[in-house]
């Protein structure tokens, strides 16, 4: 939950009309800011003091404000002192002796000596306005708000999962007081409240910012949360008799500025400051949500959404987020194997494999790749297939989608398989043909990547009848058991590469953890194998491979690995 | 730079006077209080503030004070401490402290007795005690686990008992109307 820049206008929308600029002063500096800025839905709304300060590079502390949620203005943390130009009876600005407009600072009406702040997140700027984000009065307001928020806060940071990424901790250090003046008994509220299958609530820690309420109502469309009771006993609760169990509940844990909403999955697993973060992609469906993988000592602890307005905004679904446990499964394939492999090292294995493939007659091979593989791997597989005269296809995976993020296409790289020519426009359309030709004996050798073909029309008996069966996979399956050459592969979190999502956005991801044992990114041995099979100048690096294929495949329109950046770029599909 | 060696005088070249003065010092110590001791049968009593081996403590009511916040693991310069947090399972017997270490290991071969773990501990759960002679027959034996550390650490008299106070306060305010409405 780091600082959010104001929502940029989506690149795919038509170019917005030029926005009128107005002149204001922030912290004594003259500044021209747009009169309107897009709100959480992308509609232009008057620019607020908080946004103006962000444009000036000054961060105003805030809890309830979130650029992707409607504004509530209830935490009061973003209070700032401001002033507006004084107007005479003729509605013209009154000028000082030196010709500058005279500024009337906002003060309490009944106590003109005391500054009266306004909340930065919901107060629109006006021409000539002056904002004082660092004035003594502003600092005093922040200190007072924090003191109020901390009155009933349990201060159980040592047992709180949010510690280390908690806005209450951060702002207390930056803007708060060193000691508490509160000597009365704190109000206690329920702890360890079971809100839903994935969420545990600690009411004592809640600062009632209502981010979670707004998220689940306005983004997830499941109005499940609300506040009950009044005053000090104000408490977050789910609707009576209902469990908070939609597919987006864990986003409320991310946006909770304190440790009130905790993920049952990550609860008490690891402190956040130990986690190494890698910018990766969710591979659970075709949407390709941008994620941050948190790992420590080669163990993955959590997936968190990473902001990308062209794909997933700041959110991701619970199913995708929790789909990481298989990566650390005990039965992962970690040894080179298969009934015919003699070598114990990759060098030897690739050599043996190249010999076996060269010995097969052209036109008797088929390759069943997976649309879960990276575009670079699929490209190399296609190269090998062309060299060997093999037919290729990949397996479609269709499930249920929703209106928000989940795509019905459960393969993360179906478009990659189409663009590299592994599959036709419809994935899996040549599978029945391949199965028939295996049955008839026309196809004598099969290379399978990451799929259990016994579940897709190629029976165990048909596999047993083959002269050559090469399998590259990560988890055991019936196909793996029958392999003549078994090459252990990697999960997306264990390798680098790029996916092309359902909307044709090419996005790259980096390695988060190291694979165990012999398991090795498929790209590495595929590039060795292409070389051994006599393909000229096979790309040696993932970057080089992407740059190469982007030149060769017109849909990528001259993209390069570098131009993909951290949020990807659109390919023409 | 060359330092010229001073030539010894005639008196010094005799050597015997120096030997005699040496024996004089030895003889004087015959009649003084002994400064050596019969280690390991006799043990040295360490001064207060001595930084010996770090152990875990329990409070006077027998609760393991460590809540598994992992700050000591983070601050430990030689990375001698390794904590396994408890995971998400709700601990019903935990009163107000929902978290405690599932395992807590200190590799005493790595420990440099710097005391940062004690300094950083927000719960006063780990203390550098007076043990200075740690030995074992294998490396594995020198990795002290939670049970061993607790047994060696003993009881620390907690004057505040903050978690207990919180539990007492919470019980006094037991009415939470919202709880009944929850599924």
Image: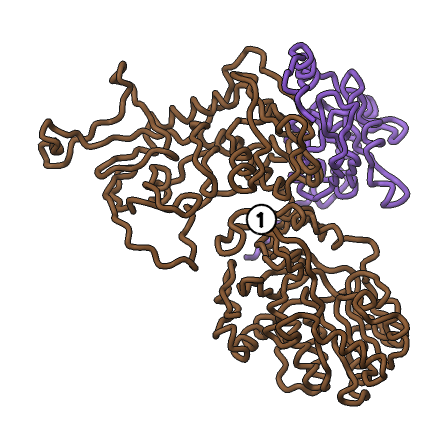
Chain colours: A brown, B purple
**What residue is shown at x 52% (from left), y 55% (from top)?**
A311
Residue B127 in view here: no
| Crowding at mark 1 (Cα within 10 Å: few <14, some 14-19, many 20+) | many
Q: Is residue A524 above or below residue B160?
A: below
Q: Residue at x 74, y 16 (%)?
A: B157
Badge 1 marks a residue whose secondary structure is strand
Q: Is residue A179 left or right of residue A381?
A: left
Question: Picture coordinates of residue A359 (x, y %)?
Answer: 81, 88
- Please tell me which residue lies in front, B176 or A298: B176
Q: Nearer the viewer, residue A301 or A194?
A: A194
- Residue designated by label 1: A305
- In this view of the protein, can residue A147 be seen by the observer? yes
The chain that hosts pointer 1 is A
Give the camera-side residue of A385 and B44.
Answer: A385
x and y percentages locating residue A6 in the rendered image: 41, 46
Image: A512 above or below A260:
below
Q: Is residue A104 left or right of residue B112?
A: left
């Amino acid at each position: 939950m780091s600082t959010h820049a104001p929502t940029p206008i989506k690149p795919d929308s038509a170019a917005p009309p030029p926005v009128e600029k107005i002149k204001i002063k922030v912290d004594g500096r003259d500044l021209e800011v747009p009169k309107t800025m897009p709100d959480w839905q992308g509609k232009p709304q008057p620019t607020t003091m908080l946004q103006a300060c962000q444009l000036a590079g000054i961060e105003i502390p805030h809890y309830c404000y979130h650029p992707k949620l409607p504004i509530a203005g209830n935490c009061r943390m973003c209070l700032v002192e401001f002033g507006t130009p004084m107007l005479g009876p003729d509605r013209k600005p009154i000028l000082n002796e030196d010709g500058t407009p005279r500024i009337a600072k906002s003060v309490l009406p009944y106590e003109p000596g005391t500054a009266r702040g306004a909340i930065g997140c919901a107060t629109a700027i006006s021409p000539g306005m002056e904002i004082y984000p660092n004035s003594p009065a502003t600092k005093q307001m922040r200190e007072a708000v924090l003191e109020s928020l901390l009155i009933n806060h349990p201060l159980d940071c040592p047992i709180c999962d949010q510690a280390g990424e908690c806005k209450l901790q951060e702002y207390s250090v930056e803007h708060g007081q060193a000691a508490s003046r509160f000597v009365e008994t704190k109000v206690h509220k329920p702890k360890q409240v079971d809100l839903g299958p994935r969420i545990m609530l600690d009411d004592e820690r809640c600062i009632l910012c209502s981010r979670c309420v707004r998220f689940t109502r306005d983004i997830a469309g499941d109005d499940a949360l609300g506040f009950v009771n009044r005053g000090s006993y104000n408490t977050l609760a789910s609707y009576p008799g209902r469990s908070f169990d939609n597919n987006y509940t864990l986003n409320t844990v991310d946006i909770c500025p304190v440790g009130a909403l905790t993920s049952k999955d990550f609860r008490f697993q690891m402190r956040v400051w130990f986690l190494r973060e890698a910018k990766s992609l969710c591979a659970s469906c075709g949407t390709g949500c941008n994620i941050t993988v948190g790992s420590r000592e080669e163990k993955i602890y959590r997936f968190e959404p990473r902001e990308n307005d062209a794909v997933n905004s700041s959110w991701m679904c619970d199913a995708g987020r929790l789909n990481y446990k298989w990566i650390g499964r005990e039965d992962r394939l970690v040894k080179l194997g298969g009934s015919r492999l003699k070598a114990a090292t990759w060098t030897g294995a690739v050599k043996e494999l190249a010999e076996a493939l060269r010995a097969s007659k052209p036109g008797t091979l088929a390759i069943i790749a997976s649309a879960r593989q990276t575009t670079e791997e699929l490209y190399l597989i296609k190269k090998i297939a062309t060299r060997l005269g093999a037919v290729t296809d990949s397996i479609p995976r269709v499930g249920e989608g929703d209106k928000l993020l989940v795509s019905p296409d459960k393969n993360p790289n179906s478009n990659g398989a189409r663009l590299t020519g592994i599959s036709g426009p419809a994935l899996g359309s040549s599978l029945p043909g391949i199965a028939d030709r295996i049955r008839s004996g026309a196809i004598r050798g099969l290379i399978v990547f990451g799929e259990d073909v016994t579940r897709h029309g190629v029976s165990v008996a048909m596999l047993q009848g083959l002269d050559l069966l090469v399998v590259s996979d990560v988890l055991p399956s019936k196909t793996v058991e029958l392999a003549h050459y078994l090459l252990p592969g990697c999960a997306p979190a264990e390798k680098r590469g790029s996916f092309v999502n359902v909307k044709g956005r090419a996005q790259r991801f980096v390695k988060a953890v190291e694979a165990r044992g012999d398991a090795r990114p498929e790209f590495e041995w595929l590039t060795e194998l292409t070389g051994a099979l006599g393909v000229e100048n096979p790309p040696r690096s993932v970057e080089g491979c992407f740059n190469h294929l982007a030149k060769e495949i017109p849909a990528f329109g001259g993209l390069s690995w570098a131009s993909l950046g951290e949020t990807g770029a659109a390919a023409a599909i | 730079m060359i330092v010229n060696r001073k030539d010894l005088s005639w008196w010094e070249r005799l050597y015997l006077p120096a030997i005699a003065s040496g024996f004089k010092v030895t003889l004087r110590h015959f009649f003084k209080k002994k400064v050596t001791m019969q280690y390991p049968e006799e043990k040295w009593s360490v001064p207060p503030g001595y930084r010996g081996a770090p152990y875990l403590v329990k409070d006077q009511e027998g609760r393991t004070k460590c809540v598994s916040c992992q700050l000591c693991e983070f601050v430990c310069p030689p990375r001698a401490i390794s904590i396994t947090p408890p995971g998400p399972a709700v601990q019903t017997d935990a009163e107000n402290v929902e978290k405690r270490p599932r395992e807590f290991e200190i590799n005493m071969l790595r420990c440099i007795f710097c005391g940062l773990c004690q300094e950083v501990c927000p719960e006063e759960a780990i203390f550098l005690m007076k043990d200075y002679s740690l030995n074992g027959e294998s490396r594995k034996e020198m990795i002290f686990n939670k049970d061993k550390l607790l047994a060696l650490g003993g009881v620390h008299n907690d004057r505040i008992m903050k978690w207990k106070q919180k539990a007492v306060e919470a019980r006094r305010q037991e009415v939470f109307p919202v709880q009944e409405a929850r599924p």
